[in-house]
């Protein structure tokens, strides 16, 4: 069976950010080329939707739902495409590799608030937002927060690493899932319908809010959200 590749889809964000929307439209064409060997993910663009696997965490994700409701007023402006979750999603078992090829799960990065982003080198809006994710990690990364950007490019690390080098990524750790399993896990949880997909998770790996499509992650709107999420988890902010 040929490799499946998720479709790029950011129409909702395009309504509020025309420049990124144009890039996203181009990316749909690029996705068609890159995904000629597979089937695309389609559906709602951001926020809640789809069937969920439910809370498998013994109820601990209730706190993430409550936190998302508190943060809902901050999901505006540059991050208006993000929506707080109203059903539980525990992503502890989300699997990928670190920069040395060592298998990890999201739980291995736990104990802090994280912004988890799935991207691919062929995805134009993914490429557009990566410098902002790098800036966000530079400004807010530490014991209380991390950007976990996971490439879902098939094959070796060569293409995604080349892209990181081309744009001068200095602050993001390199993570890669060549199996597309991470995307399929999020799709099953009703979180992912295209690329890029971003989820805000708490220290227990429970989803607070999610978004499909690009955003300006180094903007004041995004920084306010991250500060509030860190503070809500008991961090320094």
Image: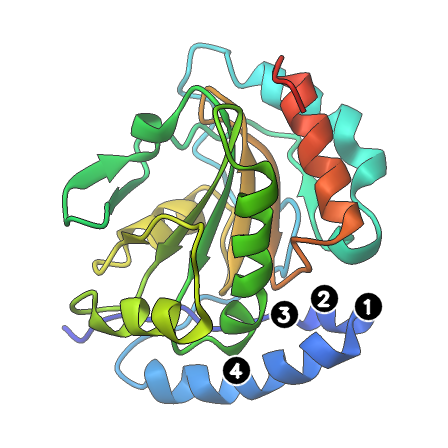
Q: CA distance from mark 1 to mark 2?
A: 6 Å
Q: CA distance from mark 3 to mark 1?
A: 11 Å
Q: Which residue is mark 2?
A: 13
Residue on which disc 1 sits: 16
> Tag 4, which secondary structure?
helix
Secondary element type, mark 1: helix
Alpha carbon separation for disc pair 2 and 3: 6 Å
The mark found on residue 10 in the picture is 3
Q: Return the mark for residue 27.
A: 4
Q: What separation in Å lies between label 3 and label 4 (alpha carbons)?
A: 9 Å
Q: Residues within 10 Å of mark 2 (few under 14, many from 20)?
A: many
The percent coordinates of residue 62 (x first, y second) are: 59, 16
Q: Position of residue 83 (x, y in %)?
A: 70, 44
Q: Reading the chain from its start, which is encountered first: label 3 or label 1? A: 3
Question: Residue at the spot x=30%, y=32% of the render?
Answer: 93
Q: CA distance from mark 4 to mark 1?
A: 17 Å
Q: Is residue 43 visible?
A: no
Q: CA distance from mark 2 to mark 4?
A: 14 Å
């Amino acid at each position: 069976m040929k490799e499946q590749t998720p479709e790029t889809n950011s129409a909702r964000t395009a309504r509020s950010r025309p420049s990124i929307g144009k890039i996203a439209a181009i990316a749909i064409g690029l996705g068609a080329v890159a995904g000629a060997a597979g089937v695309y993910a389609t559906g709602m663009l951001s926020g809640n939707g789809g069937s969920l696997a439910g809370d498998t965490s013994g109820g601990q994700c209730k706190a993430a739902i409550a936190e998302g409701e508190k943060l809902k007023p901050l999901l505006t402006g540059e991050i208006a495409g993000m929506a707080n979750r109203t059903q539980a999603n525990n992503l502890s078992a989300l699997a990928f590799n670190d920069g040395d090829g060592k298998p990890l799960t999201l739980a291995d990065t736990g104990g802090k608030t994280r912004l988890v982003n799935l991207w691919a080198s062929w995805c134009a809006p993914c490429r557009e937002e990566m410098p902002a994710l790098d800036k966000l990690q530079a400004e807010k990364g530490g014991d209380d927060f991390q950007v976990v950007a996971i490439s879902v490019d098939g094959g070796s690390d060569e293409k995604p690493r080349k892209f990181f080098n081309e744009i001068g990524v200095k602050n993001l750790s390199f993570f890669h899932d060549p199996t597309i399993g991470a995307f399929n896990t999020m799709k099953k949880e009703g979180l992912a319908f295209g690329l890029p997909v971003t989820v805000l998770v708490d220290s227990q790996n429970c989803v607070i809010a999610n978004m499909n499509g690009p955003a300006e992650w180094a903007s004041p709107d995004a920084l306010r959200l991250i500060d509030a999420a860190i503070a809500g988890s008991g961090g320094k902010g």
